[in-house]
Image (cartoon, rainbow, N blue to C red):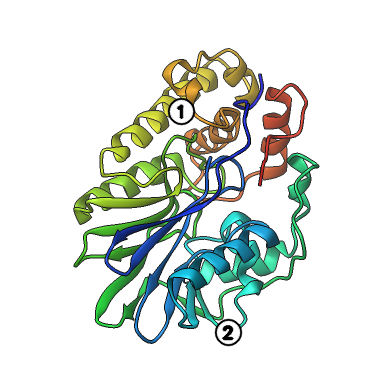
């Protein structure tokens, strides 16, 4: 089985003003390594939410911000450690980089990760320099864009990763969810927790957000939570059947009809998600280390032995 095909060139990234002074930077099509970011443009400066995966894409993000505001970028918030949200950190030398303490620890542990080789060799990553957050927190921190309160909160102990944070703007009912929410793409919890992500969705529901900037996909409303949860419960049920039958995650995935979930981008993520679900069935705590390399190799095997699709 292969990744969802991309028959046409991707549309360019675009800036979408979700409320006054608050912008989503949406990068179609939201598949592997093509994430969303955002920014808040204040009178004194700009707060950015996440960087991009490649040097080119991050430079394009900066250029897009500059067209909206001539103020300096004072702050860069990382919603989690994954490279599509952090590889471009080094291109913000003037900004205070803010993130959960686990984001800093994992970026330093990974360095420039070799696992990028699992994806299409055509990807032009550009120059890469390790630039972790240097202002960290354990539970959260509050930022202000002029007088607009932005609550950066860790959501854990494990969901998409073990170091996820959201950026919640209560006055505007706007939420930057990071990769706790995928809209149109297959959710991915290999480095976090299936059950933990379902619990995190309940936490997000309680906020009462009206506008959600997901980590990948189009800006949406809270109806997206049910779709993400539906997929994750499908993963849990598939894992229960496969685990009970003594099948490996790859075998279980190959024997499973994805049904409605097969239309999501990057369907091979079912294998990585099953690796995590199996660990939870074995009693491993949320976010406990598992063999990520083996899971990625199984996703490649599910993908017909081909590198995973990436158009970043």
Residue occupied by mark 1: 235
Q: Going 38% across and 87% down the picture, which residue do you hit?
A: 44
> Would residue 296 be seen by someone viewing this image from the given angle?
yes
Q: Quadrant of residue 110?
A: bottom right
**Residue 220 location, quadrant:** top left
Residue at the spot 38% in from the left edge and 74% down from the top edge: 41
In the image: residue 112, left or right of residue 279: right
Residue sitting at x 63%, y 26%: 7
Q: Is residue 33 left or right of residue 194?
A: right
Which badge, 1 or 2, is on the more N-terminal residue?
2
Residue 276 image point, x, y percent: 54, 38
Q: Is residue 73 above or below residue 211?
A: below
Residue positioned most to the front: 67
> CB atoms at circles 1 and 2 under 8 Å apart?
no
**In the displayed structure, would residue 287 be above or below residue 164?**
above
Distance in Å between CA atoms under marks 1 and 2: 42 Å
Q: Secondary structure at mark 2?
A: loop
Dot 1: within a 10 Å radius of its alpha carbon, few (fewer than 14), some, or many (20 or more) residues? many
* Residue at mark 2: 94
Which one is closest to the eye, mark 1 or mark 2? 2
Circle 2 Cα neighbour tier, 10 Å, few/some/many (<14 / 14–19 / ≥20): few
- Which quarter of the figure is the N terminus placed in? top right
Secondary structure under tag 1 reads: helix
Whole-percent x, y for residue 77 in the image: 47, 70
Say if 219 sits above or below 45 in the image: above
The answer to whether residue 67 is left or right of residue 223 is right
In front here: 136 or 221? 221
Residue located at (67% from left, 41% from top): 311
Regarding residue 100, the answer to whether it shows in the image is no
């Amino acid at each position: 089985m292969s990744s969802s095909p991309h028959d046409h060139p991707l549309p360019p990234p675009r800036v979408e003003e979700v409320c006054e002074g608050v912008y989503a930077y949406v990068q179609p099509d939201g598949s592997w390594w093509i994430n969303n970011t955002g920014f808040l443009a204040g009178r004194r400066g700009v707060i950015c939410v996440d960087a991009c995966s490649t040097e080119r894409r991050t430079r394009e993000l900066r250029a897009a911000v500059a067209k909206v505001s001539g103020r300096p970028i004072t702050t860069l918030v990382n919603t989690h450690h994954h490279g599509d949200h952090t590889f471009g950190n080094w291109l913000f030398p003037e900004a205070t980089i803010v993130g959960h303490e686990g984001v800093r620890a994992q970026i330093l542990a990974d360095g420039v990760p070799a696992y990028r080789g699992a994806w299409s060799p055509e990807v032009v990553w550009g120059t890469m320099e390790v630039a972790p957050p240097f202002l960290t927190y354990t539970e959260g921190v509050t930022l202000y864009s002029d007088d607009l309160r932005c609550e950066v909160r860790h959501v854990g102990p494990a969901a998409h990763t073990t170091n996820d944070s959201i950026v919640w703007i209560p006055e505007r009912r706007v939420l930057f969810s990071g990769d706790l929410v995928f809209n149109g793409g297959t959710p991915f919890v290999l480095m976090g927790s299936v059950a933990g992500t379902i619990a995190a969705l309940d936490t997000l529901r309680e906020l009462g957000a009206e506008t959600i900037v997901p980590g990948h996909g189009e800006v949406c409303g809270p109806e997206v939570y049910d779709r993400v949860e539906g997929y994750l419960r499908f993963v849990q049920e598939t894992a229960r059947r496969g685990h009970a039958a003594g099948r490996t995650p790859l075998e279980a995935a190959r024997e499973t009809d994805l049904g409605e979930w097969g239309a999501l981008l990057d369907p091979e993520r079912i294998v990585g998600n099953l690796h995590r679900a199996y660990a939870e069935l074995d009693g491993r705590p949320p976010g406990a280390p598992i063999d990520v390399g083996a899971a990625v190799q199984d996703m490649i095997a599910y993908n017909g032995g081909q590198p995973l699709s990436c158009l970043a």
